[in-house]
Image (cartoon, rainbow, N blue to C red):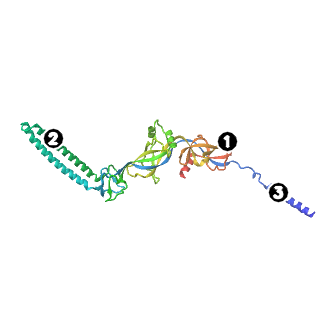
Amino acid sequence: MKQSSIYLSLMGTALFLAACSSGNKDPKAGAPAGPQNYPVVQIDAINTTLESDYPATLEGQQNVDIRPKIDGFIEKIYVDEGATVKQGQPLFKINAPQYEQAVRTAQAAISSAEAEVNAAQLQYNKTKPLVEKDIISKFDLDNAALTLTAKKANLAQAKAALVNAKVNLGYTVVSSPTNGVIGTIPYKVGALVSSTSQEPLTTVSSISKVYAYFSLNEKQLLQIARNTKGRTLEDKIKQIPSVTLVLADGSIYTEKGKIETVSGQINTATGSSSLRATFPNPNGLLRSGSSASIRIPQYVENALLVPQKSTTDIQGKKFVYLVTDTGGVKSTNVEIMELTKGNYYVVTQGLKPGNKIVLEGFASLKDGDKIKPQVKSADSVFAEAKNK
């Protein structure tokens, strides 16, 4: 009986405490949370220019291998690697005494031939009046004339041999065939060289203009072709805007370039085609063999720019949270261009001008959720992206 009284007393106390707790509870505490604030940006159509960079290799307008035309030892080197040279400027002196001897031999042969011509001329002059007086037969005159002709031919041959010998002697001095810059010089004074030597004496690169070679894949070529006016490939190339050269240190080259050629074939191994842009190089800053990047601008009308941070990637597709007229959100698939505008995608399908999308912080959102849109201007969003 005593234990029953204690049990009833404890139960009464528990019910009293529960009643007190229920009486003090805030009736709003169990109510569901309302719509949350989310930053929202409106998508408007604008005209913009997209830029894409492609790795490029620079080559001089003309790269000439300098090779000797005769055999001999290098006697002198008149220039150093990296020097700027003019057309006709001596580069190397080759010691080849056999060609000096050939000149002297040819000169002696000319002197001998001239003497023989003079002797034949005297014989002809002596024979002619005797024939006219019928002292000797006309046969002797014809024979003297033929001898004179043969001696004159020998003289002409000797003179030709002298010209050839002087030409060969001139090859002992190797001169630059064009204006340019000297490349590496693998040979030193005393080295034996010949026209069959594996390595050239050096290379002279004409760099008043520089070619930048780069490649585009088939998809990129088609995209440029479709977005560039012109009926033929040549017309389209002319319409491509001037391109920019980004140097190896990230700086922008001051001179603008122009795309001049596009290879007519797609490389089956790489799936790409080679293009060539030409840049003026008045100060000689660009050198053959350097690496750089070609930056190609592409003008797009009525582009819809979406911040990259406003998209999510699901199985290779891009999605944004579109804000509906009722304040809800809807996950919407968008298609984008391959080229980007900084931290923005260019949407081609899925959105219309005037649509609003959730800017960021949407990880916990799902279709149909209500939000409180906090609209931010597109200009302010673009300014924030540029400053990051």
Q: Nearer the viewer, residue 51 or 102?
A: 102
Q: What element carries label 2?
A: helix
Q: Which of 293 and 38 is in front in this view?
A: 293
Point out residue 169 in the picture as x, y percentages from the top left corner: 26, 52
Task: Answer yes or no: is residue 102 visible.
Answer: yes
Which residue is tagged 3?
Answer: 18
Which residue is tagged 1?
Answer: 326
Q: Quadrant of the N terminus?
A: bottom right
CA–CA distance in space, label 3 to label 1: 43 Å
Residue beneath the point at 19% across and 50% down: 109
CA–CA distance in space, label 3 to label 2: 149 Å
Mark toward the start of the polypeptide (3 vs 2): 3
Mark toward the start of the polypeptide (2 vs 1): 2
Q: Name the quadrant containing residue 133.
A: top left
Point out residue 7 in the picture as x, y percentages from the top left corner: 88, 61
Q: Which residue lies furthest to the top in this view?
A: 231
Name the mark on residue 148.
Answer: none
What amino acid is found at the position of numbered circle 1 in the picture? Thr
What amino acid is found at the position of numbered circle 3 in the picture? Ala
Residue beneath the point at 17% across and 47% down: 113
